[in-house]
Image (cartoon, rainbow, N blue to C red):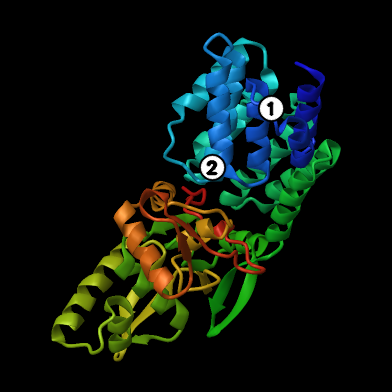
Amino acid sequence: MDSLITAAARALAAGDALGALKRVALREDAPALALRGIAMAQLGDLARARTLLRQAARAFGPREAVARARCALAEAEIALASRDLGRSAKALEAARATLEAHGDRANAAHARQLAIRRLLLIGRIDEAERALAELDAAALPPALRAVHELAAAGIALRRLRTREARDALARAGRAADEAGIAALRAEVGEAQRLLAAPAARLVAHGRERALRLDDVEALLASPALVVDACRRAVRGAGRTVSLARRPVLFALARALAEAWPADVARDALVARAFRARRADASYRARLRVEIGRLRALLRDLAGVNATAQGFVLEPRAAEVAVLAPPHDDVPAALAAFLADGEAWSSSALALALGASQRTVQRALDALAAAGKVQAAGRGRARRWTAAPATGITTALLLPAPFAGP
């Protein structure tokens, strides 16, 4: 490579996109196109960056396999940044294999990290953790080591292991300082800030207070019966009963837990579970059926007994608490993904949430009508964004199950 290409590459490695563009902005050869594409990606113009990288890959030709693989790697990173999660992982794996075969271990490790970040985004935590364990962080350059530790922190947060996450972020901060890349330092700092921010609300005995992630971890490790409105589950005595696909039963469990130790009137339960304005005979009969189902599911954790006015929760534990999301008016998992500040397509959100695209579109339309989210573009180019919730971490709302029996 000539001296300008070498200088531009060093500027990009240090995070100086403008410095790189000054050296190659007017050049149209393949290496310059590739560097311009990466620089535009760092500056946030992802569409232009993708175009330049594809031009570079064509200009390199079939004999320059390593250069083409590096272009494919950069394009995969752009796809991840633009939340194009439906993009095939085969191209990234092929690029990684080519880079490893030709001895480019740093870029091959970067390809593995991109695959891990994608797995983390779509909730495949076990696969992400196994893939991360295969990488030797000590052998990575500082910038990649910081990214490695950020991924480790993300996995720890999704598993609600706050001490592991804090240690990983401390290591990421040291690596980012060593790399000297301002954007990387900022990303680590933001993750550390969110770790200390309120993540949920504790509702008990008619009062509520904010909890940080370490407080949530302590609550779930306690002997209390916890109705978890973030993950829609009931937890206690080392057991977890998921009600994520039983919205009526979860609504009943939450209503009973919020009122404990008092009972809840039948009319109030009907309104809460079925959203009915008045409780007629058919709704009361349906309520009895649903209470029976809830009683059967929670039999090892609590009883649900009838009273003169309605029903009361009788826990095996000494305490009952409701773990509620920061805001109840926005679907929790959807809010968590949109809060990262990136522009998401409905198809990418559907993949990450494990839901149908039509279900996600209906939820987004409802949130847009309420002014909670914004859309840009039309058709397949339409993207959805929401401003991050100020002072709130949404890690607890992401759809990855807590470790349990």
Tell me: 243 left or right of 2: left
The numbered mark, 2 or 1, whose residue comes first in the sequence reads 1
The residue depicted at 82 percent of the width and 20 percent of the height is 3
Q: Camera-side residue: 369 or 186?
A: 369
> Real-space Cα distance between discs 2 and 1?
19 Å
Crowd band around label 2 with a 10 angstrom C-alpha radius: few (<14), some (14–19), many (20+): some
Residue contact at pointers 2 and 1, CB within 8 angstroms:
no
Residue 55 in the image, given as x and y percentages of width and height: 54, 27
Q: Please state which amino acid type lies under the numbered disc 1.
A: Arg
Q: Position of residue 371 (x, y in %)?
A: 47, 74
Q: Nearer the viewer, residue 311 or 338?
A: 338
Which residue lies at the image location 19% right of the left edge and 81% below the top edge?
A: 283
- Residue 48: mark: none
Quadrant location of residue 244?
A: bottom left
User: Does the image show residue 235?
Assistant: no
Reply above or below: 367 against 376.
below
Q: Secondary structure at mark 1?
A: loop
Q: Quadrant of residue 61?
A: top right
Residue 157: horizontal and vertical position, in percent?
61, 51
Looking at the rendered structure, the secondary structure element under dot 2 is helix
Quarter placement of the N terminus: top right
Q: Amino acid at mark 2?
A: Ala
Q: Which residue is mark 2?
A: 47
Furthest residue to the front?
26
Q: Which residue is mark 1?
A: 27
Residue drawn at the location 37% of the way across and 49% of the way down: 380
> Which residue is rendered at x = 24% and y = 71% of the image?
290
